[in-house]
Amino acid sequence: MTTATGLSRRGALSLGACAALTGCGFEPIYMRTASGEPGPAQRDLAAVSVAIIPDRPGQLLRQELQERFGSDAGNVPARYNLAVSYSIAGQGIGILQSSINTRVRMIGTANWTLTAIDGGPKVTSGSAKAVDGYDVLDQQYFAADLSTEQTQKRLASELADAIALQLAVFFRRRAAVATR
């Protein structure tokens, strides 16, 4: 089998996979409208105001959510309020015989509720979970502090991705039902 034949087979397979996806009605979540305007998921995400989340890890998560939604630009008036309850738990998982931790696993959990900004009933709710970790260095205290902070940033980013995707799916499905 030559390389050209291998590539043509891969190309044919990928074209077949694309054809199968279009046949089942697959559309990207963030797909723009035919006129090039933002789709329903993007429009509704931009109308979400993220409530204050306490403590430094909460601030990191709020900033990540605002970045994903594009709601901090102020271009779209807020129609929804997102309240997030966020916590991080740590576990020592790499333990030496002397009972010293060498690795810490951090588990971030975010429970969220989306409500109408006018004080209406709950629109939807959900939760997201992310796991990350860092090595404990016995060199300096500040190295462990920096590792903890970087892990908190990664957790916030992963959780923001999960929450934004859950909300985008909700908004997209709701728009699809409304157009039927």
Image (cartoon, grey):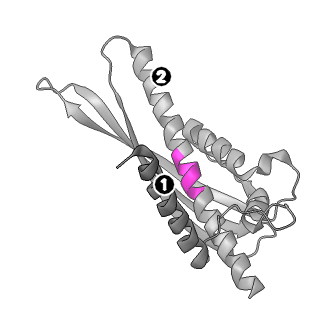
Gap between marks 2 and 1, in whole Å? Answer: 49 Å
In the image, residue 82 lies at what x, y percent? 68, 59
Examine the rendered structure and indicate whether residue 107 appears above or below residue 117: above
Point 72% across, 65% down: residue: 41
26 or 76, nearer to the observer = 26
In the image, residue 178 lies at what x, y percent? 75, 84
Point 73% across, 77% down: residue: 175
In the image, residue 31 lies at what x, y percent? 72, 63
Looking at the rendered structure, the kind of residue marked 1 is Ser
The numbered mark at residue 146 is: 2
| Extent of the magenta region | 158-163
Few, some or many residues within 10 Å of mark 2 (<14, 14–19, 20+) = few
The numbered mark at residue 8 is: 1
Contact between marks 2 and 1 (CB within 8 A): the answer is: no
Does the magenta portion include 25? Answer: no
Looking at the rendered structure, the kind of residue marked 2 is Leu
User: SS at mark 2?
Assistant: helix
By secondary structure, the bulk of the magenta-drawn segment is best described as: helix
Asked which quadrant contains residue 85, the reply is: bottom right
Asked which quadrant contains residue 24, the reply is: bottom right
Nearer to us of marks 2 and 1 is 1
In the image, residue 109 lies at what x, y percent? 46, 52
From the viewer's perspective, is 100 left or right of 154? left
Furthest toward the left, the residue is 97
